């Protein structure tokens, strides 16, 4: 299940939460102040980051599944290609 829209919206939320929790770390125009600073995270921000991490994990797992499926499909076509090459008088060189 691909949830790009939900991920995109959730990626903006921690930034808003960080700005709300740490107004003293920002300049009036919105940039981060230079120098060392202490960042506070609310419990809700931590929860948001956890949900976002889970969605990214699921996205990566889905991608891995698709890559494995594609690799298996290409390997399954190998025997078809070998037969075609041999019938045309060519040869097949296999490599790992």
Image (cartoon, helix red, strand yellow):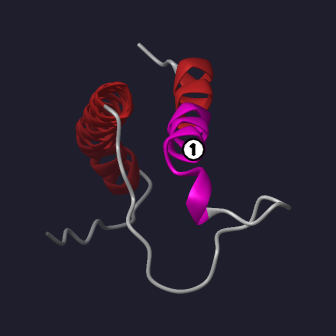
Magenta span contains residue 24: yes
Which residue corresponds to the image point at 36% horizontal and 50% vertical from the top-left?
A: 40
Report the residue marked by disc 1.
15
Q: Is residue 46 left or right of residue 84?
A: left
From the top left corner, tell me how far across and down residue 85 is, in percent: 38, 55
Residue reaching furthest to the front: 24
Residue reaching furthest to the top: 1
From the top left corner, tell me how far across and down residue 29 is, in percent: 85, 61
Which residue corresponds to the image point at 64% horizontal and 75% vertical from the top-left?
A: 33
From the top left corner, tell me how far across and down residue 32 is, in percent: 65, 69
Identify whether 37 is placed above or below 87: below
Magenta span contains residue 15: yes
Which is more toward the observer, 89 or 74? Answer: 74
What is the magenta range? 12-25
Provide the secondary structure element on which disc 1 rests: helix
Which is more toward the observer, 90 or 26? Answer: 26
Magenta segment main secondary structure: helix
Q: Is residue 76 left or right of residue 24?
A: left
Quarter of the rendering containing residue 24: bottom right
Tally of marks: 1
Give the crowd class for mark 1: few <14, some 14-19, many >=20 residues within 10 Å.
few
């Amino acid at each position: 299940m691909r949830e790009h829209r939900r991920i995109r919206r959730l990626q903006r939320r921690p930034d808003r939460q960080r700005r709300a929790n740490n107004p003293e770390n920002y300049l009036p125009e919105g940039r981060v102040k230079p120098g060392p600073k202490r960042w506070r995270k609310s419990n809700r921000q931590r929860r948001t980051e956890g949900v976002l991490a889970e969605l990214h994990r699921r996205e990566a797992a889905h991608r891995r599944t698709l890559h494995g499926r594609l690799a298996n499909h290409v390997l399954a076509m190998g025997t078809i290609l070998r037969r075609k090459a041999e019938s045309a008088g060519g040869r097949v060189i296999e490599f790992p």
